[in-house]
Every structure is written in structure tokens, then in C-alpha cells.
Image (cartoon, rainbow, N blue to C red):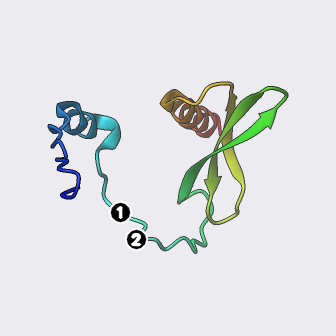
Amino acid sequence: MKKYELQARIRAANPYKNMYKKTEEHAEVANVVDRNFAVMIPETVGGTDISYFRWRDRFIYFSVVKDFASSEALAWKVSRTLEHGLVLDTIETLKEDWVSV
């Protein structure tokens, strides 16, 4: 750059980046599992996962809550769009199923 007498512009920091990180969906929670996923008691520790599949000319998104002890899918939802509401709906389904048991 010196050879061609070029100088790089320094960009200003994006003010929205910090605001976005401070929203509730990015809040940190306590790590009670401590990455110990070898749980023996069913329905005590679970996790969520989102997978996507190509179907015809679009993607289908699959959200599941999995029990770590039994590897069983406790709740699941399918959607045509990937939004944070998909996971929240999956968790709501899990809550409804647990209340009815």
C-alpha cells in the first residue's frame, strides 16, 4: 500500500452491534450441566437442536428437545422459516406435554 500511496479507511464502530448483543435472547445463564451430558435419570437434563432439510425447492426447519438420558425426542416442531419462535414453540409444546402427564 505504501508503494502505491494508498491509505486504508478506518471504519466507525457499529453502534447496533452492542445493542443487539445485550438483548434478552443473548443473555447468559448459569452452566448447571457443566458439559456433563452422561445423565442417568430420564427427563432431568435435555437440550435443543435445529436441523434443516432440503424439500423440493425450499428448506424445512426441524426443532427438537432431546432428553440426554434416554436420547428420546421429548418435543418437536417443523417450520418453513427459521425464526427464534420455532424453538420457543417447541419448548411450549414440551411444557404442555409435561403438564398433561
Q: Residues within 10 Å of mark 2 (few under 14, many from 20)?
A: few
Q: Are marks 2 and 1 in contact (CB under 8 Å)?
A: yes
Left/right placement of residue 33 relative to residue 24 reads right
Q: Residue at x 20, y 39 (%)?
A: 18
Residue 7 position, x and y percent, is: 16, 47
Amino acid at pointer 2 = Asp
- For marks 2 and 1, give the CA distance: 5 Å
Displayed quadrant of residue 64: top right
Left/right placement of residue 28 relative to residue 76 reads left
Q: Residue at x 62, y 25 (%)?
A: 81
Residue 24 vs residue 72, the one in the foreground: 24
- Number of marks in the image? 2
Amino acid at pointer 1 = Asn
In this figure, which residue is indicated by the disc labeled 2? 34
In this figure, which residue is indicated by the disc labeled 1? 31
Q: Residue at x 46, y 71 (%)?
A: 35
Q: Secondary structure at mark 1?
A: loop
The correct choice, above or below, for 79 with respect to 49 in the image is: above
Q: If the image is split into quadrants, where does the N terminus sit? A: bottom left
Residue 12 vs residue 42, the one in the foreground: 12
Question: Furthest residue to the right?
Answer: 56
Residue 21 position, x and y percent, is: 26, 40
Residue 1 vs residue 98, the one in the foreground: 1
Residue 84 position, x and y percent, is: 49, 32
